[in-house]
Amino acid sequence: MATGGKLRVNAPVEQATALLERYAALGTELALADVARNDAIAAANTAADRITVPIVDEMNAIRAQLEPWWTRNGANLLPAKRKSMELGGCVIGSKTGSTSVTFALGNDELAATSLQAARWSLPYVRVKPSVDKAALKSALAGKHGDKLRAMGFGLSTPVETFILDRAEQSGTVAA
């Protein structure tokens, strides 16, 4: 059966099978096109790397030479109250990063717990409540179910969805 025709709901299984075989064949064509695309992208990346890697390497070598030179000579070259300047077609100089909070406790969670323990530091801790959906799902079937439903909680009915995928076969390309 051609894809241009319409499969009737009461059509025999042979007509549906022909459409399924066509769907599987199209999936194979799609997978092969994806492989060809990925191969072309990999080839383009390889060609670009042949050009760019030596350039990046040379730029890194020049940077490694200029940084200590700038550290020693930059202050004498800079205009007043400036940290960078244009020189030789480049902007050269330094910039100061922003400050950040550090703590010896290792991670945010431990730091927040430590701050929560001291009453004076509560303004420095954010508390973000969230709904425990797994617990609510169980509770809706339990003694608080009526109260939770009165508050607007409930369970959705799972929707059955049609699936159609090409079956994987050994030796074939995955879509």
Image (cartoon, grey):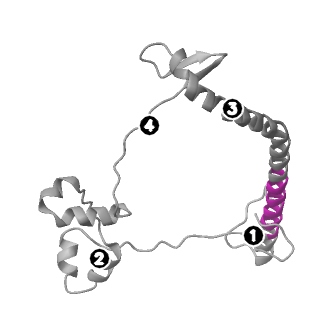
Please state which amino acid type lies under the numbered disc 4.
Gly
First in sequence: mark 1 or mark 4? Answer: 4
Amino acid on which the number 1 mark rests in the picture: Arg
Disc 1 and disc 4: Cα gap in Å? Answer: 53 Å
Secondary structure found at label 4: loop
Name the residue rendered at 43%, 13% in the picture: 80
Q: Residue at x 83, y 43 (%)?
A: 44
Q: Name the residue at the top extreme.
A: 79
Residue where numbered disc 4 is placed: 97
Q: Which residue is mark 2?
A: 136
Any magenta on residue 165? no
Magenta-highlighted residues = 21-37
Dominant SS of magenta comes to helix
Q: Look at mark 3 in the image and give the residue it sits on.
A: 65
According to the picture, the residue beneath numbered tag 1 turns out to be 166
Percent x, y for residue 86? 58, 16
The secondary element bearing badge 1 is classed as loop
As measured in the structure, the alpha-carbon distance from the residue carrying label 2 to the one carrying label 3 is 63 Å
